[in-house]
Image (tube, rainbow, N blue to C red):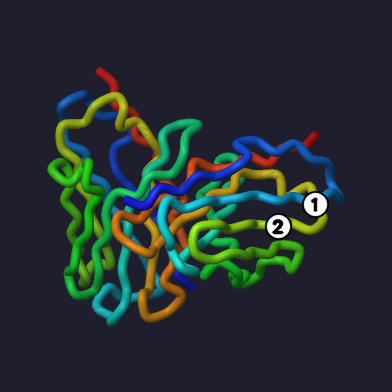
Amino acid sequence: EIELTQSPATLSLSPGERATLACRASQSVSSDLAWYQQKPGQAPGLLIYDASNRATGIPDRFSGSGSGTDFTLTISSLEPEDFAVYYCQQRRSWPLTFGQGTKLEIK
Amino acid sequence: QITLKESGPTLVKPTQTLTLTCTFSGFSLSSAGVGVGWIRQPPGKALEWLAFIFWNDEKYYRPSLKSRLTISKDTSKNQVTLTMTNMDPVDTASYYCAHRNVYGLSWLDPWGQGTLVTVSS
């Protein structure tokens, strides 16, 4: 099973600041990694797929990078609606696995 | 537009069997590449993938829960069913179903709204 480790667990920032979230895989997943955003009381939604592609309707302040074992989600300038929990997920091999999440909170 | 919705009991007793149904629209589970999966999330905790079923009846299960899980599909009703036996309080979670097309985007998109299942006597 491929383990995904996200850091930090919690990130406290202010609107307008830049957010950098990390996801590390226990073995290479190539570019088979996605990021999901989950707001309180809602289901997760696809944000970034194939490590660096924005899903439909996702603003360009969101970007993803990385391949192999190290990945980054960057939000260039935080908007109030961006404060949520973010999960990475790999599809390289079964079982599908998620990271433990990074909570992005307002400072 | 693809939509999915989970349904089932909100409360089950320990040792009982949970049966959840995912009813979807906007796609067919008889179309090549299409699959529906189940993911759960205990309150305040991370997401955990459980099971997947594809158009060709290929099935995948979380290894640690494989003995307790069964996933099936009814193509005519646009439904996918997940059963989990021998429920325990640690299985209390929101249960989500999600669409995947391995010949398309091939990620979990979209998700249903989820249903909260509490395991308690």
Q: Amino acid at mark 1?
A: Arg
User: Mark 1 — on which chain does it sit?
Assistant: A
Q: What is the number of the mark on residue A18?
A: 1
x and y percentages locating residue B8 in the rendered image: 29, 43
Q: Is residue A29 above or below residue A97?
A: below
Residue at 29% across, 58% down: A94
Along the viewing direction, whichever of A94 and B98 lies nearer the viewer:
A94
x and y percentages locating residue A39 in the rendered image: 61, 45
User: Mark 2 — on which chain does it sit?
Assistant: A
Q: Are marks 1 and 2 in contact (CB under 8 Å)?
A: yes
The mark nearer the N terminus, 1 or 2, is: 1
Q: Is residue A83 above or below residue B14?
A: below
Q: Amino acid at mark 2?
A: Thr
Residue at 17% across, 69% down: B57
Residue B74 horizontal side relative to residue A76, left or right: left
Count every numbered label the image shows and give the total.
2
Residue at 33% across, 47% down: B7
Residue tagged 2: A74
x and y percentages locating residue B105 in the rendered image: 46, 75
- Mark 1 vs mark 2, CA separation in Å: 7 Å
Pick out the residue farthest to the right.
Answer: A16
Circle 1: element type: loop
Residue A36 horizontal side relative to residue B112, left or right: right
Along the viewing direction, whichever of B2 and B50 lies nearer the viewer:
B50
Circle 2: element type: strand
Residue B84 horizontal side relative to residue B4, left or right: left
